Every structure is written in C-alpha cells, then in structure tokens.
Image (cartoon, rainbow, N blue to C red):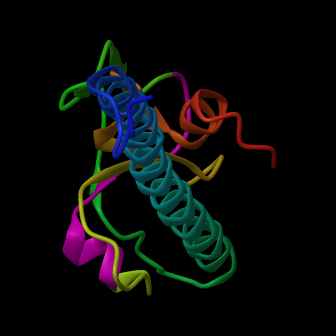
Amino acid sequence: MKNKKGISLVVLIITIVVMIILVGIIAINVSDVGEEAAAMKFLNDISIIETKVMMEQYNADTLDNYVLKGTRITASNPVTIGDTTYPIGTGNWYMLDSNDIKNIGVKDVSGTFVVNYSTAQVISVSGIKVYGMMYYTFDDVARAIDFVY
C-alpha cells in the first residue's frame, strides 16, 4: 500500500478556482458599496441644500429687500443639465456655485446646483453616476439605489 502525503494536483486546482470565484464576487459587492456610499452622500448633500433653499425663500418672503443667493436663470440665460433645459415653468430658478452654497450656510458641499426657490427643488449640474447611469436629482438617485425616504 502506498503512503499518501500532501494533496493532489486536482484538489489544489479546484481550491484555486473556488478562491478566484469568491474573490470576484467580493470585488463586485465592494464596488457596489462604494457607489452606494457616494450616492448616499449625494442624497445627503441635496437634502441639506433643499432645507437651506426653503429657509432662503422664507427669508425672501418675510424680510424686506432680501436678495436670494445665486444667479437668476431666465429664458434668456437658460441652463441645460442632462436632457433638460432650465428654467422650466414658473418659479425662482437660480444657479448656485460653491460660494453661493457657502453663503446660504451649507459647509462641506461643493459643486454647482440649479435650485427653484419656490419649490425647493435642487438639481446637481454635474450629477452622479450610479450603476453606469447619470442622475441629477434626489428622487432619481434614490430610485436608482432603492433608497426609502
């Protein structure tokens, strides 16, 4: 009878193949987590800006001579984001850059946003890529990651 020591080549190859499959599955899941974390930060930033936009509109409604922050968007100077050109319909549409964002009291958020002071709608000019698609609004990103709010 032969004395077998160690493992056979077949067992070694099967073990390596299983490990490669597991590493591939883990890598895919980790990349999704990174994308979802970026999407959650995007949602948080938009929520903070929406709250501040509501406060700005309240100040404009209640204080004499209060000037809304940002650059007014009108039909003569529209802004196109994705497939949509703003302003749409009525409302106080403004473009807020990073300095305007700071001036309304939002820290640690950069970028340029189009806001409607009348409805508190906030649209990111640069947007965020989630699962290979570009999104620009809170609702669109929330739907993309199945975020319940």
Q: Is residue 98 magenta?
A: yes
Residue 63 on image: x %, y %: 61, 85
Residue at point 60%, 62% (across, down):
47
Which residue ends up furthest to the top in the rendered image? 83
**Among the 4 quarters of the image, the one containing residue 26:** top left
Q: Which residue occupies the foreground of this view, 63 or 134?
A: 134
Q: Is residue 4 placed above or below 133 in the rendered structure?
A: below
Q: Is residue 21 magenta?
A: no
Residue at point 54%, 36% (across, down):
141
Left or right? Give the position of 131 relative to 143.
left
Residue 88 on image: x %, y %: 47, 23
Residue 20 on image: x %, y %: 32, 32
Q: Is residue 106 placed above or below 82 in the rendered structure?
A: below
Left or right? Give the position of 48 relative to 113.
right
**Among the 4 quarters of the image, the one containing residue 57:** bottom right
Q: Which residue occupies the foreground of this view, 113 or 148?
A: 148
Residue 144 on image: x %, y %: 58, 28
**Among the 4 quarters of the image, the one containing residue 101:** bottom left
Q: Which residue occupies the foreground of this view, 45 or 59?
A: 45
Q: Which residue occupies the foreground of this view, 6 or 51?
A: 6
Q: On the rendered image, what quadrant is the N terminus found in?
A: top left
Residue at point 42%, 48% (across, down):
30
Which residue ends up furthest to the right in the rendered image? 149
Residue at point 55%, 39% (across, down):
91
Total marks shown come to 0
**What residue range appears in magenta?**
89-102
Q: Is residue 135 placed above or below 48 in the rendered structure?
A: above
